[in-house]
Amino acid sequence: MPENLTRKILREHLVEGELEPGEPIGLRVDQTLLQDATGTMACMQFEQVDVERVQVDRAVQYIDHNIIQLDFKNPDDHRMLQAMARKFGIDYSRPGNGICHYVHIERYAKPGGILVGADSHTTTSGALGMIAIGSGGLDVAVAMAGYPYEIAAPEVVEVRLEGSLQRPWVQAKDIILELLRQLGVSGGKNRIFEFTGAGTADLAVPERGTIANMIAELGATSAVFPPDDQTRDWLRRQQREDDFADMGPDDGASYDDRIEIDLDELGPLVAKPQSPGNVVPVEEVAGTELAQVCIGSSVNSGYADLALPGAVLADRDGQIVHPMIAATATPGSRQILTAIAESGVYRQLVEGGVRMLEPVCGPCVGMGQAPPTDGNSLRTMNRNFPGRSGTPDDSVYLCSPAVAAVSMVAGRIEDPREYGDPPDLLDEPELKPYVDDVHIFKPAGEEEAESIEIPRGPNIKTPPEHTPMEESIEARIATVQPDDISTGDLAPDGAEVMAYRSNVPAIAEFTFRHRDPEFRKRLHEWGSGFIVGGENYGQGSSREHAALAPLQLGVKAVFAKSFARIHRRNLVAQGILALTFKDASDYDRAEVGDTWTLPKVREELESGADDITVEIDGGDSFSVTHDFAPKEREILVEGGLLHWLQEHGERAR
Ligand code: MIC
C-alpha cells in the first residue's frame, strides 16, 4: 500500500508497538535538543538515569532563553550546562550563537531522522523532512540515555498547498495562521501534518520552518516537509549536502485526513489577544493603535523576514518607525546576523529606528521588551498567551513580517496590500552564510569526561523525588480552572521566574500566580491537593516545570475535560495522575476546598481498568477515565518515570 513519508520515517524508527493511531509506540531517536530553560532539569534528570554518556547520534544543548543575567542564577546555570555538555557528550551552542530552532535547521536537522527536544517548537526541524517532536525534559533525558521515545502513534494529515503565495505581502506565516483559524489550538492533537502540493515546492526552508514551528500552536505532534530541491539547496548552502536524502510520500499515499489551502486566495492574517487560535483577516483589526512592534523569535527571524521591514524603512526618504512605537528586530542566528550586517539590512533597520536585539529568544518569552500598560503589542512571534510578554494584562497580536513592517511605520495595524509596489529587498549574500561551528563547543573525549566536575551554584536544586503511589488517594480541590490553561499559567515566562528553572521549590511559588494567587497558600496548609481544569489543559510550552511545580506543592492528580499532549505526558512522567471527566458536566461538581477520594486507584491502574472511581465528600461518587498506555500505568504506580527506570530500566532497553 502506498505510504506517506511520516509513516515511512516512523516505521524505520519503530522499536515497540503498532503504527495504528492512538496505539502506544516506542521510537529510536537520532537527535535530541535542549535549551537552557529546560536543559538544566533535563540534564540533572539524565544524571539520575545512571548512564554516563548520551547514546544518540547527536545531542545539542543551546543557550538562548535565559539570557538576562540579573544576578548569579542564570550564569550559574549556564556554567553547569557547559560542564555537563562536555562531560555527557553533548554539543554546546554558546549564548549569542542563535535561537535553538534556527541553529538546528542550519547545522543539524537531517531528512528522514527523528529529533526529540525539550521545547515545544522543536517541530521547526520538520522543515527539513525530519519528524521533530517537542517533549518534557525528562522524556528527552531518557531518550538521551538511549531508551526508546514513547508516544501515541499519531494520525497523519496531508496539507495540500495549491497555488502560490502573493509575496511579499502574503507570507508563510499566513499559511500557519490559516491552519490555526481552521483547526484551533487543539485541532492538531496527536496528529502529524505532512505538507504537499505545488505551493509547498515554492516555500524556502525558513518559510517551512515558520509553519513547522507553529504547528505546536495547534497542539500537533509534528509537521513534515518532504525533502526536495529547496531542501537540497539549503543543505548545500550549509555545506552539508551529504545530509540530503531523497525520500517522499509514495504516489497515491493514503492519509488519515486531508486539508487543502489555496494560496492564491490567502490574505494576511492576525491572531488577536490572547490566543494564537484567535485568527482574523488583517482588515478586521486594521487601525488598531500600537505601542510596540517586535520582529523575530524562533519564527520570522530569517534573512527575508528582516530584509522586508528593512526595505520598507529604506523605501522613502525619512520613513522611520512611528514616534509612539518601540520597535525591535531579532536575527535568528549568528549566521543571519552576519548576513544582514553584510548586505546592509542591519543598517536599514537601525537607521529606520528599530532596536536590534541579539540572536536569542528575547521578547517571545518575556525576556525583556515587555509592552507598556494598556499598550497593544504587534509581534511576528508564535504565542500570545496572557502575560507571556511579561506585562500581566498584555494585549499581543501575532502577524507576519509584512504586516509588522508597514504597521511599525504607521503606528497602527495596517493591511500591507495597501502599501503599493513592494520595495526592493537587499540580496542575501550568496556565498556567505557564516557557516562556521566555532561557537559550538564539542564534548570531551570519554577519558577526559570522567574527570570533569560539575559546578553547581546555590540556586540549583536536584529535581523532586518520585515516590510510589498509595492504595488510595484523598485530597482537597486546590483550584478550579477554565478551558485552555497554558503551561505559562503554571510556570510563568519572564526573566524573574525563569531564573528559577533549576530550583523547583522556588519556581513552585509562582504557580497560578495570576489566575489563583491563593492556590499555593492552600497547598502549603493542606500538604496535598487536586487541580481541576477544563478543555485543552496545559496547552503551549513543553516546560515540565508546569508539572514539577505542582508535584513540589503536593498535587496528586489533575482532573480535566481534556489535556494538551505534552503536558499530559509530563504529568504522568512526574507521577501525577492526568484524569479526564467521562461526563464533562462532572467538572461542575468541583468546588475549591471539597475533598475527593480515589478509593482504589492503585488497584484500578494495576488491573488495567478504564475508569477510576471518585468519591465526593458526603457520599456521592462518579467515574473519571484516562488514556494511559500500559507502561504509563506502571509509571504512575511507581510514582514517576525516573523511579520506574530505576526499578525496571533493563526491561525498557
Ligand atoms: C516557548 O516558546 O514557550 C518556550 C519558552 O520555548 C518553551 C520552552 C520553555 O518553556 O522553556 C516551549 O515552547 O517549550
Image (cartoon, helix red, strand yellow):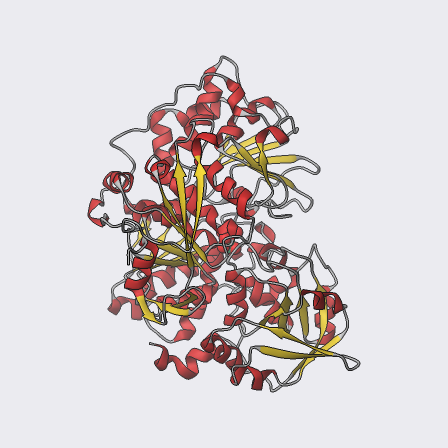
Q: Nearer the viewer, residue 92 or 528?
A: 528
Q: Nearer the viewer, residue 97 or 542?
A: 542
Q: Is residue 180 left or right of residue 376?
A: left
Indicate the quadrant containing the C terminus: top left, top right, bottom left or bottom right.
Answer: bottom left
In the figure, residue 594 lies in which quadrant?
bottom right
Residue drawn 56% across and 25% down? 415
Pick out the residue farthest to the right.
618
Query: Residue 619 at x, y = what percent?
Result: 77, 82
Seen in the picture, residue 14 relative to 268 is either above or below; the reply is: below
Query: Residue 486 at x, y = what percent?
Result: 60, 55
Q: Is residue 130 left or right of residue 514?
A: left
Residue drawn 50% across and 63% down? 457
Residue drawn 28% across and 63% down? 12
Q: Is residue 584 visible?
A: yes
Query: Residue 192 at x, y = what percent?
Result: 42, 54
- Label tally: 0
Pick out the residue farthest to the top.
317
Residue drawn 53% across and 17% down? 319
Q: Nearer the viewer, residue 521 or 316?
A: 316
Indicate the quadrant containing the N terminus: top left, top right, bottom left or bottom right.
Answer: bottom left
Q: Is residue 355 left or right of residue 163?
A: right
Query: Residue 506 at x, y = what percent?
Result: 61, 64
